[in-house]
Amino acid sequence: MKDTIKALVEAFGPSGYETEVIDLIKTMVGDHADEMRVDALGNLIAVKKGTGGGKRIMFAGHADEIGVVVTHIDDKGFLRFLNVGGLNPFSLLGNRVRFANGTIGVIGREKGEAKDISLDKLFIDIGANDKAAAEAKVNIGDFGIMHREFTDLGQRLIAKSMDDRIGCAVLVEALKRVNDTPNDLYFVFTAQEEVGIRGARTSAYDINPDLGVALDVTLTGDSPEAPRMEVSLGAGAAIKIKDSSLVTHPKVKALMTRLAQEKNIPYQYEVLERGGTDAGAMHLTRSGVPSGTISIPCRYVHSVSEMVDQGDVQACVDLVVAICEDTLAELM
Ligand code: CO
Ligand code: ZN
């Protein structure tokens, strides 16, 4: 599974430009899905048909990642930019940006107090001598991502865009492992989550599921002086109870808890103060869809070095497979 994760986290896919990621996932799941389609917004929907009499389950992991968009190029060839999704200016300094054509730049800042740092004080230096040289490589409106390689620490892994390629990797692995089931399974690799949970909204309308489950990262409270939060790296799949986009349906919480207990899958409950996932859109689809989120605990979310634990990742795969193969008594 490490190869799958490495390939996914190193791919280029800022919100709206997920094609490279989607094409990669197609090659990973093609042999295991009965149908695959990419919809108008760029969501990849991989379907595994049930043997009949079951429910329609939609799983969503977002294919996009946070990034930048170029807004201005000055006479000396420095680029100004806006965020695509939530960027913390403190995590950007000295880091590198990569554009779709392979151009790489470093993020620098204007003079001023470190505490006053904000995106409008930052610029990207692509090594160009003047505006014309910069424009030969990058144009206004070009999207870039943070540039950083995958690092394997053994039990734990670090990369940019673990949010949410690790959720995509969990779904890829689960789709490979799932056996015959009465349920119709829709594995959706969604577009544009980071800019407002957009791809999940349209794909959920299309699929009209009986159950919605998002796979996404969540914060942890286990690093020095971390904000208070009862989620730890290595303590298992995090069953979300609530965030700002969703209250997990009590039936879905009961379903996930029962399956984790029955299958001896390590799990923990997650209450997230701020933030949302694709489940925020799924549960408001049409006349409403019971939904929940399985979160992969992750340190340093939205930095270039997001860290996950392989034991947690495996627990999330096991829980997704268990849901796929269950008769879902709680939802009857
Ligand atoms: Co995110
Ligand atoms: Zn995410």
Image: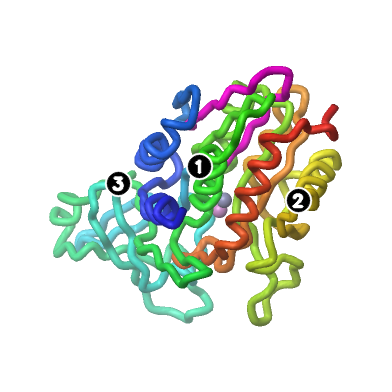
Q: Amino acid at mark 1?
A: Val
> Which residue is under mark 1?
172
> Does residue 319 appear to the left or right of 35 in the view shown?
right
Helix, strand or loop at label 1? It is helix
Name the residue located 32 percent from the left edge and 46 percent from the top edge.
142
For marks 1 and 3, give the one nearer the viewer: 1
Q: Nearer the viewer, residue 109 or 310?
A: 310
10 Å neighbourhood of mark 3: few (<14), some, or many (≥20)? some
> Which residue is under mark 2?
260
CA distance for labels 1 and 3: 35 Å
Image spot of residue 145 (x, y percent): 38, 54
Q: Does the magenta segment cover residue 46?
A: yes
Image spot of residue 323 (x, y percent): 70, 39
Helix, strand or loop at label 2? It is helix
Name the residue located 36 percent from the left edge and 50 percent from the top edge.
11
> Which residue is under mark 3?
140
Magenta residues (range): 43-62
Name the residue located 23 percent from the left edge and 48 percent from the top edge.
101
- Earlier along the polypeptide chain: callout 2 or callout 1? 1
Image spot of residue 196 (x, y percent): 58, 42
Question: Can you say which quadrant of the picture contains the C terminus?
Answer: top right
CA distance for labels 2 and 3: 49 Å
